[in-house]
Image (cartoon, rainbow, N blue to C red):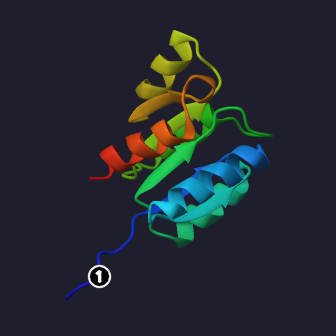
């Protein structure tokens, strides 16, 4: 019998209650979860660890999620990025996808369960 390696997700979210809720939900589904509250912490962790998915907020202190996407694109990032933001404008969605985001979730319109299900589907 062999164990399936659990998928590793990094959540880039500066709102602690949201970060904690997402972490608990994803861990309960068997994912390994790391958190970063801002860009510097994110890039440190991503250099050290192998991640299967990045869950990225756009509204972050200092450096925005858009700037993180631009930097990842410049580095030929191969890790799928799902943007989870409260920005619901079509141009924000389009810009995120143009910068390489695989999917875009509007947090205020999506339950935690729906976010987890979307991640599970993307990582199958």
The crowding category of the residue bearing disc 1, from other C-alpha atoms within 10 Å (few below 14, some 14 to 19, many at least 20), is few
| Placement of 121 over or under 102, stated as above or below | below
Q: Is residue 41 left or right of residue 50?
A: right
Q: Quadrant of the N terminus?
A: bottom left
Helix, strand or loop for disc 1: loop
Q: Nearer the viewer, residue 81 or 7?
A: 7
- Residue in the picture at 63% in, 38% down: 57
Residue 80 is at least partly visible in this image = yes
Q: Which residue is mark 1?
A: 3
Residue closest to the far bottom = 1
Residue 43 is at least partly visible in this image = no
| Placement of 48 over or under 55, stated as above or below | below
| Placement of 49 over or under 3, stated as above or below | above
Q: Nearer the viewer, residue 41 or 57?
A: 57
Q: Position of residue 46 (x, y in %)?
A: 55, 62
- Residue in the picture at 56% in, 18% down: 92
Q: Position of residue 108 (x, y in %)?
A: 63, 25
Q: Nearer the viewer, residue 39 or 17?
A: 17
Q: Position of residue 119 (x, y in %)?
A: 41, 46
Q: Nearer the viewer, residue 34 or 99?
A: 34
- Residue in the picture at 50% in, 20% down: 93
Q: Position of residue 12 (x, y in %)?
A: 63, 49
């Amino acid at each position: 019998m062999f164990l399936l390696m659990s998928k590793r997700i990094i959540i880039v979210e500066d709102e602690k209650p949201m970060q904690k809720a997402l972490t608990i939900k994803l861990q309960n589904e068997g994912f390994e979860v790391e958190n970063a509250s801002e860009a510097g912490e994110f890039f440190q962790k991503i250099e050290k660890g192998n991640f299967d998915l990045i869950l990225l907020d756009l509204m972050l202190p200092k450096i925005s999620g858009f700037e993180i996407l631009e930097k990842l694109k410049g580095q030929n990032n191969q890790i799928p990025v799902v943007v989870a933001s409260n920005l619901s404008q079509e141009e924000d969605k389009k810009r995120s996808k143009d910068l390489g985001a695989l999917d875009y979730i509007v947090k205020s319109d999506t339950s935690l369960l729906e976010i987890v299900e979307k991640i599970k589907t993307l990582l199958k």
